[in-house]
């Protein structure tokens, strides 16, 4: 077991930040699905970043790369599968080599669920959501922008695959 919350608290404390206030919501905006998944359009949401060739190493096992972060919600066609990376994420590099992008970008697996009739349709674009460390920006800017893209894609359900 990796004690993520405790490690995160310690990490920020060592940098002199006040104790992190985890998001806590008494209610959520989620709702039951209006129709079965096999009749629904699913939109994939990801926190992976588009590859930028001009930036330092963003490949598997790369050190944390703050330059690769992005700050605006984006969309990308899923065909062909876009080149997205996770070097901008503070993940556990000791226990995860991040060699297989299908672990954070399961486009092929989702296409399989579509062909098997599990999901009605996969939206033809994915939505990228920044990993800003601001609850305010997430709630006031990123979440509404992501929702607008999901609605534009006529998706009935969204699947967030965080990195």
Image (cartoon, grey):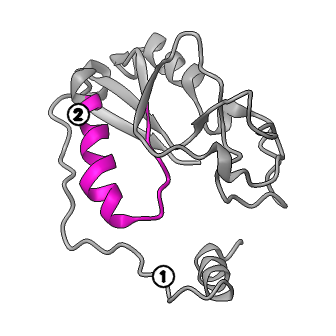
Horizontal and vertical percent for residue 60?
A: 81, 40
Where disc 1 sits, the SS reads loop
Q: Main secondary structure of the magenta part?
A: helix
Q: CA distance from mark 1 to mark 2?
A: 29 Å
Other-residue count near label 2 (Cα within 10 Å), few / some / many at <14 / 14–19 / ≥20: few
Q: Is residue 13 left or right of residue 155?
A: right
Give residue 38's quadrant in the image.
top left
Q: Is residue 60 left or right of residue 157?
A: right
Q: Is residue 143 magenta?
A: yes
Residue drawn at x 67%, y 30% is 52
Q: Is residue 96 above or below residue 76?
A: below
Identify residue for label 2.
Answer: 148
- Residue 74's disc number: none
Quadrant of image for the N terminus: bottom right
Identify residue for label 1.
Answer: 20
| Viewer-nearest residue: 124 or 67 | 67
Give residue 159's quadrant in the image.
top left
Horizontal and vertical percent for residue 75?
A: 42, 26
Residue drawn at x 65%, y 43% is 68
Q: Is residue 142 above or below residue 53?
A: below
Marked residue nearer the N-terminal end (1 or 2): 1
Where disc 2 sits, the SS reads helix
Q: Is residue 36 left or right of residue 68?
A: left
Please state the extent of the stretch shown in magenta in the rendering.
127-150
Other-residue count near label 1 (Cα within 10 Å), few / some / many at <14 / 14–19 / ≥20: few
Q: Is residue 47 magenta?
A: no
Residue drawn at x 59%, y 20% is 82
Q: Is residue 52 left or right of residue 161?
A: right
Name the outermost residue toward the left.
Answer: 34
| Viewer-nearest residue: 117 or 17 | 17
Horizontal and vertical percent for residue 62?
A: 82, 46
| Viewer-nearest residue: 8 or 141 | 141
């Amino acid at each position: 077991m990796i004690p993520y919350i405790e490690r995160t608290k310690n990490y920020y404390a060592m940098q002199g930040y006040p104790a992190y206030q985890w998001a806590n919501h008494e209610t959520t905006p989620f709702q039951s699905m209006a129709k079965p998944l096999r009749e629904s359009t699913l939109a994939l949401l990801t926190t992976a970043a588009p590859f930028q060739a001009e930036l330092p190493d963003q490949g598997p096992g790369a050190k944390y790369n703050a330059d690769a972060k992005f700050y605006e919600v984006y969309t990308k066609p899923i065909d062909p599968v876009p080149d997205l990376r996770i070097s901008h994420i503070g993940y556990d590099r000791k226990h995860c080599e991040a060699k297989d992008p299908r672990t954070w970008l399961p486009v092929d697996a989702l296409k399989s669920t579509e062909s098997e009739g599990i999901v009605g349709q996969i939206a033809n674009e994915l939505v990228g959501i920044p990993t800003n460390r601001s609850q305010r920006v997430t709630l006031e800017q990123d979440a509404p922008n992501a929702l607008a893209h999901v609605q534009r894609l006529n998706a009935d359900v969204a699947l967030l695959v965080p990195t």
